[in-house]
Image (spheres, grey):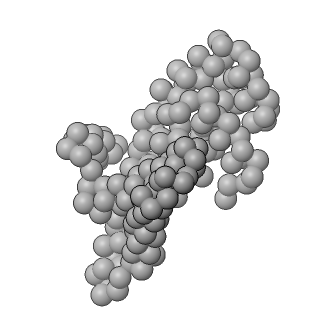
Amino acid sequence: MITATILQAILSLAQLSPKITKWLSGTSIDFVSRQLLDIAKNVTNSKNEAEAIEKLKNDKKMFFLFQRALISSEREIELAVIKDKENARTRDIAIINTGRRNIRADVMVLAAAIGLITCLVVIIIYRKTLPGEAVGIISTVAGIFGACLKDAYNFEFGSSRGSKEKDQTVASIINRM
């Protein structure tokens, strides 16, 4: 279980290295968060997360070492994320095989679609009266809903060819272990 302290620390690390944000999803978030915080504490020789983050922010050499450690651990973290997606797809298949629907997933996709459409309708209807900042914020929210729909489609139908090839390569590595 992720505590508020761990969540705050991992978000601080994500600000230092945007690569981290792509790993923070699904049930693997607990493993990934702890792994990343351990890397930060080991690199900085710190006893706690706050001290490690402070050192990474203020010491370029330690930040560089942290980046190198992330690259070294990337394979293990990517495998955890892929395994998490694989488990979620297996769960969905099991639900469908029992003759039921995955209502939670249906609601999530429907909510994202409604959110996207609502944002676009608001922009179209009120475009002349809304200040530019409001249009920017609503457009950003619409982009987030669009990204949610993209993720749902990637989950349901698979992702791009290049990503499929990467998944196959990683799967073959897993099978060799």
Residue farthest to the top, as pictured: 61
Q: Quadrant of residue 117?
A: bottom left
Residue 60 shows in the view = yes
* Residue closest to the far bottom: 99
Question: Compared to 134, does 53 lie above or below?
Answer: above
Image-based side of 75 in relation to 176, left or right: right
Who is closer to the viewer here, 154 or 149?
149
Q: Quadrant of residue 133?
A: top right
User: Of 137 and 25, which appears nearest the observer?
Assistant: 137
Total labels drawn: 0
Residue 162 vs residue 137: left or right?
Answer: left
Q: Residue at x 61, y 28 (%)?
A: 16
Point out the residue furthest to the front here.
128
**Residue found at x 55% / y 52%:** 130
Vertical placement of residue 106 versus 48, above or below: below
Above or below: residue 133 compared with residue 3: above
Quadrant of the drawing holding the C terminus: top left
Q: Is residue 45 visible?
A: no
Q: Residue 112 at what x, y percent from top left?
A: 44, 65
Residue 113, given in percent of the width and then of the height, sits at 39, 66
Residue drawn at x 73%, y 54% as measured from the top left: 3
Left or right of residue 171, residue 88 in this image: right
| Residue 128: % across, % down | 49, 52
Residue at the (71%, 15%) spot, across then down: 59
Locate residue 71, reporting x and y percent: 47, 26
Camera-side residue of 99 and 172: 99
For the N terminus, the image quarter is: bottom right
